[in-house]
Image (spheres, rainbow, N blue to C red):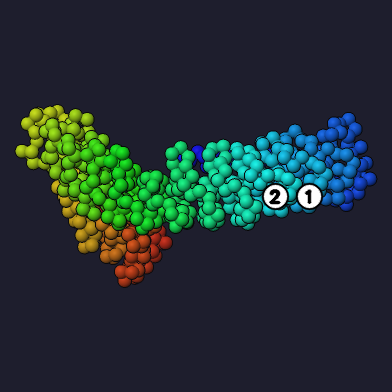
Amino acid sequence: MNYRIIFVSLFFMSFNYSMDTAIHPILNAQYRTAMYQGDKEKIKELLLLISEGNDATMVGIQVLRFAVQNNLIEAAQALIDLGIDGNAQTEDGWTPLTAAVKNGCAEMVKLLLKAGINRSGTNKDGWSPLDIAAHSGHRESLELLLSAGIDSNAQGIFGWTPLHSAAFQGHEEMVKFLIGLGADLDIRSMDGWTALHRAIQGGHANIVRLLLDANALIDAQWKGRNMPFYVALENGRTDVLKTLLDAGADVNAQDSLSIVVQNEHKEAARLLLQSGADVDAPDASGLTCLHKASKSGYTAMVQLLLEFKANMRVIDTRGFTPLCYAAEQGHQKVAQLLIDAGADIDFKSPTGITPLYRATQHGQKAMVKLLLNAGAKVDSRDADGFMPLYVAVKAGHITITEMLLSFMQESQIPQNLIHNFMVIRAQDNLRALEQAPNLQAKVRLLHRNVFLSSRVKEQLRSEKTKLFDAIKEDNVEQVACLLKGGFSLNTCDQNNDTLWHAAMKYASGKVLAFLLSLYPSYTVSVWDKKNNQGLTPLEVAVLSGNGLFLQDIVTKIMAGTPVVVDTKKTRSCVIQ
């Protein structure tokens, strides 16, 4: 998080708060008219009336405040002529000149300056009229203040000059004006930043270009860094970065690519790469940008780096590849990207650590499954001779143990683990799932998080195929038996078609009647369910040419006709 930006934001919030929360004196219509007309006698009468029993100075400044904030020139002149102290502050730090400058009323500013009001006085937050003029972009007010003798390089709150404020706010014409006056381009604020830093921080490429064209230091150092380029990298503004690169900034300086990658500035990274940034430049730990993006799970950034031929086999000082980091953090999309791009799934570190080993160490179940399905060697050993299975057992990862065993032959299990309690338990779970007598038994085991091996998955796929084939054939007895066996009414095929989709697609009236008789309360939600093509069951019926069938079904539903099912044929299979 960029705390500097937060600090500056709070700084400007305090500015707005201090100027906008003024409380005006309560004026009746008569005296309000006098103020707007600049009637000096009425205003004098007003002051005497309100001052009774009150602090006359404070009353005067409040009335002057009303005049200034409403740009009532004649009223303000009348009040000054009556001796109101224009340098006095209200309790909340308000001064007439700061308000006039913020309002951008040059005529009021001119009047107050002519009256000799202190041009350098600050409000309670430390803002001077010059600070406010530069921040607000009121050039005429700024010119008047400078003409009154204020230095254009005067450093106000936090050491900012008018050029700092104008550059940060993106006031192009004011920046041009100040440059034309000869303002110091490289004067530093209290935190060591120049106007160029502020323009970059504000994301104003046009101001950056103006300052560079005027010979502002492009490599102004702060704490050993080329700060203008560094700030641009952190912000990730491609237009600002391009301006700096065009002006001669070193594309490989400041670990530039690494900064934008870690901040997920994809387009900024693309710009740097297109400008010649070294895609495989390592840091002190040997980590490249691909390592960092993979570890952080930045899928889009990994994709971009691969597009620019980032080296997937490069290792850091620990001997780990980008895939190893994706594996340990469980970033499946990144891992799949790397594998699809040709990453060595079994690459070993100097200590024999593979991505599968690392994923197992960190208990990343989904990642272990992905790597095994991608063909990772399950019996690969580290430098001490240990397999991932040993790591899983030692860490107590029962599901990962089951995963690894499901991809191993009996002969591959190390001798010292054959009689291990967790290994035996995992083998028993896998065996129980594979040999379960029916789907319900399998579902119960799966609900206990027993790993679904490829063999059992194929068994379930086969049973599901039978279910949808039975619907297609309108074989209500077979459908009933399979549902009783454990299939849910929410079962979908690979196209995300529900049982209702299939029944409507094939005009399977008996099956549809049976489904509706089992769970009539489902009749609302099931008709709204969409498949992968975005079609509901009714839409599938229409597109399948089953309009008459659909019409008959709708007619029965609307008429409230009870659905009759031949219970003699389905009695043995009715769901309990």
Disc 1 marks a residue whose amino acid type is Lys
Q: Residue at x 26, y 57 (%)?
A: 494
The residue labelled by disc 2 is: 142
Disc 2 marks a residue whose amino acid type is Leu
Quadrant location of residue 188?
Answer: top right
Q: Nearer the viewer, residue 378 or 217?
A: 217
Q: Residues within 10 Å of mark 2 (few under 14, many from 20)?
A: many
Please, what secondary structure does the residue beneath circle 2 have?
helix
**Mark 1 vs 2, N-terminal side:** 1
Q: Is residue 350 visible?
A: yes
Q: Nearer the viewer, residue 136 or 329?
A: 136
Q: Is residue 32 visible?
A: no
Whether residue 150 sits left or right of residue 249 in the image: it is: right
Say if 256 sits above or below 420 in the image.
Answer: below
Q: Residue at x 90, y 33 (%)?
A: 52
Whether residue 513 sits left or right of residue 27 in the image: it is: left
x and y percentages locating residue 332 in the rendered image: 28, 46
Quadrant location of residue 428?
Answer: top left
x and y percentages locating residue 576 in the rendered image: 26, 44
Label 1 close to label 2 by CB (< 8 Å)? no
Q: Residue at x 16, y 39 (%)?
A: 404
Farthest left residue? 411
x and y percentages locating residue 104 in the rendered image: 72, 51
The residue labelled by disc 1 is: 110
How far is the residue under mark 1 from the one under mark 2? 11 Å
Please, what secondary structure does the residue beneath circle 1 have?
helix
Q: Which mark is residue 524?
A: none
Q: Residues within 10 Å of mark 1 (few under 14, many from 20)?
A: some
Whether residue 218 sits left or right of residue 292 in the image: it is: right
x and y percentages locating residue 51 in the rendered image: 88, 34
Q: Residue at x 24, y 49 (%)?
A: 312
